[in-house]
Amino acid sequence: MLGVAVNRQKYSYPVGKVEELTLYPLDFEEYLWAMGKDALATEIRAHYQTDETMPEAWHELALEQYQNYFIVGGMPAAIIEYLRTNSFLQVQQVQNNILNQYIADMAKYADPTTSVRIRACYNSIPTQLAKENTKFQYKVVQRGGTATIFGEAIEWLVFAGIALKCQRLEHGFIPIHAYVDLSDFKLYMADIGLLTLRSGMPLQTILSPIEQDNTYLGAMTENYVAQALTSNGQKCYYWQSDGKAEVDFVLQCNGQVIPVEVKKGRRNRSKSLGVFAEKYHADYALRISKKNFGFENRIKSVPLYAVFCLV
């Protein structure tokens, strides 16, 4: 939030005296380190590189830790509280305090009119993600809402680092940033733990080993992936065809365009990856789900707990 304050007050930087560092919530690998599970993090990276299946015991342990992270998230205070109490309820009290501090900062670092709009946009994120079409819609914030009214508020949230913007690509050519549709985007929360709290999703639903037929849980999983990509320095993009095909994320790595599909569970039937790969001649695609590592039919299977490996 300090960055917003500095920007708004138009303070100058002494040349050569200031080094800017961008800090993010802890990603899942850093969470594992905090939990004392360095060996598990190392094992995940090794299997990501080789595409070899993780031993089932390791795989299930990693999924269990991933589900815990879905609740705790990456805010340092929340992780410290979890280490201290081992209580999700205590963690959510800390997270609620963090959200209240966000609201206070919105009032402190923005004029009254803009502050109200910032809060309205931020508070709408869980509702935006609950829609079948998760594209950000200003009318969900307020009836009659437009980009003219709320555009500055969105940019404030993104600049402050408490919301993540995922923009739609019109085409999947290199460089992908040249084909951004500026009018269409999704907005995610910067921390999955805070989203879990704000969503009101029952904790037993997240922790259940049974496959959940819950579309909102799918949108929350996309939020988790967006957070991980952002932590790794990736800008978030998605692609949608003129028809109904949609690819959750599109990456550009080493001169290649890579479509990424995100699934909350193990069921992975979707035609969108194939549509994109054929249209834009992608060498391979990534499918993120609860399935183990693997590579088949030009699709690299990446477990949800291994998203931190994507660069």
Image: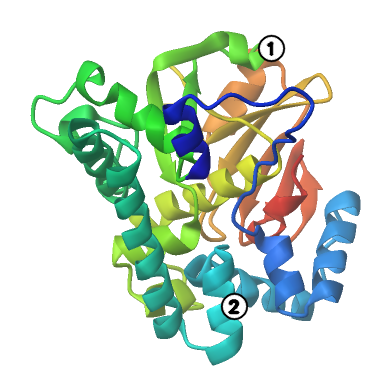
Image disc number at residue 241:
none
| Up-down relation of residue 244 to residue 118 (above or below) | above
Q: Are marks 1 and 2 in contact (CB under 8 Å)?
A: no
Image disc number at residue 80:
2
Residue drawn at (31%, 30%) of the image: 153
Mark 1 or mark 2, which is nearer to you?
2
Residue 170 in sight in this render: no
Q: What is the secondary structure assignment of the residue under circle 2?
A: helix
Residue drawn at (45%, 37%) of the image: 5
Q: Residue furthest bottom?
A: 85
Give x and y (percent) for residue 99: 36, 60
The amino acid type, in three-letter code, at marker 1 is Pro
For marks 1 and 2, the one nearer the N-term is 2
The amino acid type, in three-letter code, at marker 2 is Ile
Residue drawn at (66%, 23%) of the image: 277
Q: Quadrant of the C terminus?
A: top right
Compare residues 152 and 294 and report the one nearer the observer: 152
Residue marked by disc 1: 175
Residue drawn at (81%, 63%) of the image: 44
Cα distance, mark 1 to mark 2?
Answer: 40 Å
Give x and y (percent) for residue 223: 48, 48
Q: What is the secondary structure assignment of the residue under circle 1?
A: loop
Would you say 177 lies left or right of 233 here? left
| Up-down relation of residue 185 to residue 225 (above or below) | above
Give x and y (percent) for residue 250: 61, 29
| Up-down relation of residue 95 to residue 163 (above or below) | below
Compare residues 201 and 159 and report the one nearer the observer: 159
Would you say 308 lies left or right of 190 here? right
Compare residues 273 and 96 and report the one nearer the observer: 96
